[in-house]
Image (cartoon, helix red, strand yellow):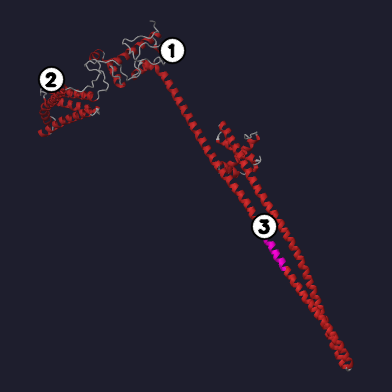
Amino acid sequence: MSITDWPRTAAEPDPETASPAAVSGTPQPVSRTPGTVSDAPEFVSETESGTGTDTSTAKLTGTQKWTAGAIVVAALALAGIGLYLSFEHVADFAFKELRFGSLGKGQLFAVGVDVGIMVMIAVDLLMAWLKRPISWIRYPVWLLTAATVVLNAASGAPEGAWKLLDYVAAGAHGVVPVLFIMVVELGRTSIDRVVRPDQEERDSIPLLRWILAPVATARIFRRMRLWGVTSYPEMIRRDQQLIAYEQWLKRKYKGDISKASEDELLPMKMAPYGYTVDQALAMPDEQEQAAQEREEEAERRRLDAETRSEVAKAESEAERLRAKGKVEAVRAEVDGQTGQARAHARAQVSAAERAAELEEAALETAVIAEARSRQAEAERKEADEREAKAAADLRAAELERQAAEKRKEAAEADRVAAAEAQAIETRTIAEAREAAAEANRRAAETERAAAETQRATAEANRKTAEAERLQEVALAEAARAKQEAAEAERAAAETRRVAAEIERRAVEAEDAAKLKPRERAVRKVARMILAAGGDADRLPLAEIQHELAVTSPGTASEYRQEAAELLASGYRPEQ
């Protein structure tokens, strides 16, 4: 074996446990120790007292039960003997030397100490039986027992110089209490083993080792208690392995261990903390692996957080798109209803206009009828006037005849009568002429009214024809308006379908590009600008606020500006 080979330990290694990976540059060890500090070897380790780690789970036989009962009775008898022997001495010593004032108070003191010891012992055994042991309760018991031993020994101390027999007598006062405490500890340990058979036993260090190497043994005891090593042979193997490794380092570096690296010195540094040589050498790799696992875990959590964030964003965007689709559907429905309402309103207006025209035509017909009635009335008046004129002419002829007769008669009268007759004849003729003139005037007015009535009748007939033509035009316009409304509705539906398809393709492209919400919003505004004719200024900010659910006009203006710049750079949604 060369000086750089891994040394063999004095104790045989455990064949079932493999050593962890060594530090880079360090040879693979031959001996193998358990992987963890608290793992005990599989073999049964026998202690100096003869107790092993194997436990029996079998039930007690009848003989064993009787034996246990007899032991309990003997322990109680031993306790009674101890109390009886120490009671009087402690009470008398307390009265005389401890200044309790009276013997009764000294007896109460002795009873209090003994009862306290018994109560704490009973509680300790009960909690051990209930598998809930109280580890610190034994220390007050030991302290009170030691006090009882001291008081008993002091009660038997001589008043003068001490002799050898005096020491023996003082020690004899403490034999029974010490013996009783030992029996109690034995009983406590027995109960603990019965109620907790799977509890791991701790090996005790041989007494001979304490005598031969007290300092090294104390270090071994300390390490076993601090780091939970229950196997004494395992602890010996660890020390041997550490010593062998240290010797190997000295041979490797020719006696100067300071030349060794930090990783190679780890076994000596970590041995006081319960690490084996293999565990200390594997610690750097384990720490690096643990750090790498922590980094991977942190990276995984970060990726999970990003994934959850992306999923939340996608769900939010999908919800927004669904809401927007519902809004678009409602808007399309409202637009359709609005178009239908407008067409219906136009039809109602046309019908109202037609009704007004018909009413006007009816009114004009009534006017024509009234005009005809007036014309008939005028013709009747004209006929009456003609009759009156004829009657007047007839009367004038008759008057002229009478005048001729009167002229004839007047010629025969004297001149005064002729002159009077002439005057009468002149006035009558003037009245007749005036009546004729009035008749002529009335006839002219009647003819003028008849001409006006004929003109009004012709105008009424013309307006009736015009009303019928306008009604036909209105019906044609209503039919064309209905056709145009249907065509507009179909074109709007087609436009919405094309816009929805473009929007869907754009959203798929944006999803594939994994765009941020602001980039999606800018592209949405760009598509709105294209739908508005390509001029960004023609797109109102209110419509952008409505589509993107933003409250600030400044934010909407920023979106419109960025969308205009995006269109200027050549962006066009997928057709």
Residue at numbered disc 3: 354
Residue at numbered disc 1: 25
Foreground mark, 3 or 2, reads 3
Residue 389 appears in which quarter of the rendering? bottom right
Number of other residues with Cα within 10 Å of mark 1, as a class: few under 14, some 14 to 19, many 20 or more: few
Q: In the rendered structure, which disc, 1 or 2, sits on the residue that comes first in sequence?
A: 1
User: How many numbered marks are there?
Assistant: 3
Q: CA–CA distance between discs 1 and 2? A: 66 Å
Q: In the rendered structure, which disc, 3 or 2, sits on the residue that comes first in sequence?
A: 2
Residue at numbered disc 2: 167
Please state the horizontal and vertical placement of residue 369, each as a whole percent of the image.
71, 67
Foreground mark, 1 or 2, reads 1
Q: Residue furthest top?
A: 1
Number of other residues with Cα within 10 Å of mark 2, as a class: few under 14, some 14 to 19, many 20 or more: some
In the image: residue 551, left or right of residue 352:
left
Please state the horizontal and vertical placement of residue 423, each as a whole percent of the image.
85, 88
Q: Amino acid at mark 1?
A: Gly
* Residue 205 can be seen, yes or no: yes
* Secondary structure category for the residue under label 3: helix
Image quadrant occupied by the C terminus: top right
Q: Which residues are magenta?
A: 355-370
Number of other residues with Cα within 10 Å of mark 3, as a class: few under 14, some 14 to 19, many 20 or more: some
Please state the horizontal and vertical placement of residue 334, each as a whole percent of the image.
58, 47
Tag 3 and tag 2, C-beta contact below 8 Å: no
Q: Amino acid at mark 3?
A: Arg
Q: Is residue 521 magenta?
A: no
In the image: residue 415, left or right of residue 350:
right
Q: In the rendered structure, which disc, 3 or 1, sits on the residue that comes first in sequence?
A: 1
In the depicted structure, whether residue 538 falls above or below residue 51: below
Please state the horizontal and vertical placement of residue 133, each as a whole percent of the image.
24, 28
Q: Amino acid at mark 2?
A: Tyr
Q: How would you classify the magenta stretch by its main secondary structure?
A: helix
